[in-house]
Image: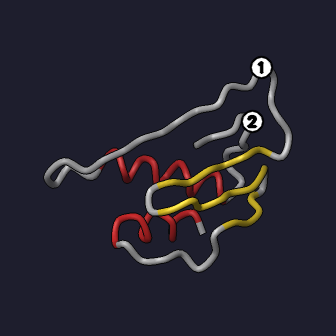
Amino acid sequence: MLTEWLDWTLEGKPASRRSGPLASGNYTLHGPGILELTPETLGDNPHACVFSAAIHGNETAPVELLGELLAQIEAGLLALGSPYW
């Protein structure tokens, strides 16, 4: 689902689901390019994080790296410990 969010953001297509569970929390799609990830349980000394990525010309690496991070979270390879917006 999170990889669909990236496609939806880049292509302007609506996502099939706006919220749902992840292995370590939940996601909520607020709109194109705005994704909120909330952990099921907070880690020690949690801090909210904001990730922002953009494309400049044909440089897509920042968006691709963000997509890889989301794929790992969705697959349960990375666990959420702090809220992400």
Q: Which mark is residue 45?
A: 1
| Percent position of residue 21, x then y | 77, 62
Q: What residue is shown at x 42% (from left), y 41% (from top)?
A: 52
User: Which badge, 2 or 1, comes first in the chain's sequence?
Assistant: 1
Q: Which mark is residue 81?
A: 2
Q: What residue is shown at x 72% (from left), y 42% (from top)?
A: 80
* SS type, badge 2: loop
Under mark 2, the amino acid is Gly
Seen as rendered, the residue at the extreme right is 41
Q: Which mark is residue 77?
A: none
Seen as rendered, the residue at the extreme top is 45
In the figure, is residue 56 to the left or right of 20? left
Q: Above or below — where is 56 with respect to 10?
A: above
Q: Are marks 2 and 1 in contact (CB under 8 Å)?
A: no
Seen as rendered, the residue at the extreme left is 57
Label 2 vs label 1: CA separation? 9 Å
* SS type, badge 1: loop
Q: Total marks drawn?
A: 2
Quadrant where the C terminus sits is top right
| Percent position of residue 79, x then y | 72, 43
Under mark 1, the amino acid is Asn
Q: Quadrant of residue 83?
A: top right
| Percent position of residue 78, x then y | 67, 45
In the figure, is residue 79 to the left or right of 17? right
In the figure, is residue 82 to the left or right of 53? right
Graded by Cα atoms within 10 Å as few (under 14), some (14 to 19) or many (20 or more), the crowding at tag 2 reads many
Q: What residue is shown at x 50% (from left), y 62% (from top)?
A: 31
| Percent position of residue 12, x then y | 37, 72
In the figure, is residue 2 to the left or right of 80? left
Quadrant where the N terminus sits is bottom right
Q: What residue is shown at x 58% (from left), y 32% (from top)?
A: 49
